[in-house]
Image: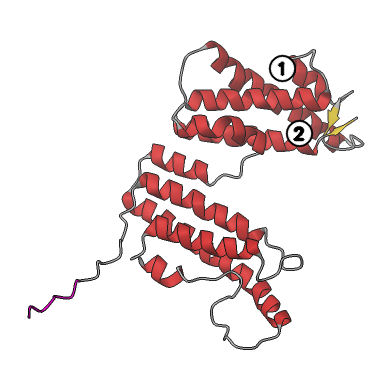
Amino acid sequence: MPVRRKQDTPEPERKRLGPEDIELGTRKLRRRIDEVKALDPTKVRHDAAAVDAATRNIKADITDIFGAGSQEYLTHGAHSVGYPEGYSAGYIDDSQYQEWFAKGLPKTVAMLEGLVRRLEEKREDLGLDPTARARATFEGLDLHPRIRDVAADLFRDGHYRNAVSDAALALVNMVKEKSRRHDLDGSGLMSAVFSKNSPVLAFNDLKEQTDRDEQEGMMHLFMGAVLALRNPRAHAITDDTPEAALELIVFLSMLARQIDRAKRV
């Protein structure tokens, strides 16, 4: 009777990461970090559906990014958010589990941040060109939502000039909306809304000279955003490098956050 040979079990996949894999993997892990940070142990139980979902998402992303045969998966693939590693099974008071859950959340975040650093090291090892570095850096930015919504897809698709132009336009629209001065535009809008003498939107109480200096300085920054960033890109067909676009979008995001803190006078 013939003897059936035992089939070899295929070795788990070990992925070779390219530049795009690293960018995508970094985005995924940062989403997982935000997901875990949103779990408030004073309001969420260790066995809640959201906690189970976070555990599943972490495992799926580690598998997808690094591969099931990777050291990253072997080390962290069985990580549990609700039942941190090292705690014994058996009858344990529910409050004890909740305490362990709370203590384990920062460790989960640290683990995910460590995986992000691992990807950053792989990026350095590949010696990525400036464009790839700029694109990878962009993915890690915490941009103002209004700026991110209009600029992110354009930047990722390589339309750097349009990304800056649309971000500048979004900034102008934010000023119009909060100041209710839809009758003005461009530098005239910025000088009227942020004037240190009779502003519509103020960044401080304007009681001291330092306050007035800040107000005037911010006015010039907003005017510059229109004159130097929006207007040239509206009238000339020249492109920005990814590095320049990255820096300008960060600048516009900073101004957008200043609008959020400004108060109507």
Observer-nearest of 210 and 163: 163
- x, y percent for residue 158: 44, 29
Pointer 2 local density, CA inside 10 Å: few below 14, some 14–19, many at least 20: some
State the image coordinates of residue 14 (x, y, percent, origin top left): 31, 61
- Residue furthest toward the front? 1
- Tell which of 56 and 156 is nearer to you: 56
In-front residue for pair 222/82:
82
Classify 84 as above or below 221: below
Q: Main secondary structure of the magenta part?
A: loop
Q: Tell me the crowding category of disc 1: few under 14, some 14 to 19, or many 20 or more residues within 10 angstroms, Cα based.
A: some
Disc 1 element: helix
Identify the colour scheme used: secondary structure
Residue at 66% across / 33% down in the picture? 146
Asked if residue 14 is positioned above or below residue 195 in the image, the reply reads below
Residue 243 in the image: x percent, y percent? 47, 34
Q: Residue at x 85, y 26 (%)?
A: 196
Please state which amino acid type lies under the numbered disc 2: Ile
Q: Is residue 201 left or right of residue 238?
A: right
Q: Report which residue position mark 1 lands on.
A: 187
For mark 2, what is the residue?
259
Magenta highlight on residue 3: yes
State the image quarter where residue 62 is shown.
bottom left
Magenta residue span? 1-7
Is residue 262 among the parts visible in the rendering? yes
Disc with the residue nearer the chain's start (2 vs 1): 1
Query: In the figure, 3 relative to 148: above or below?
Result: below
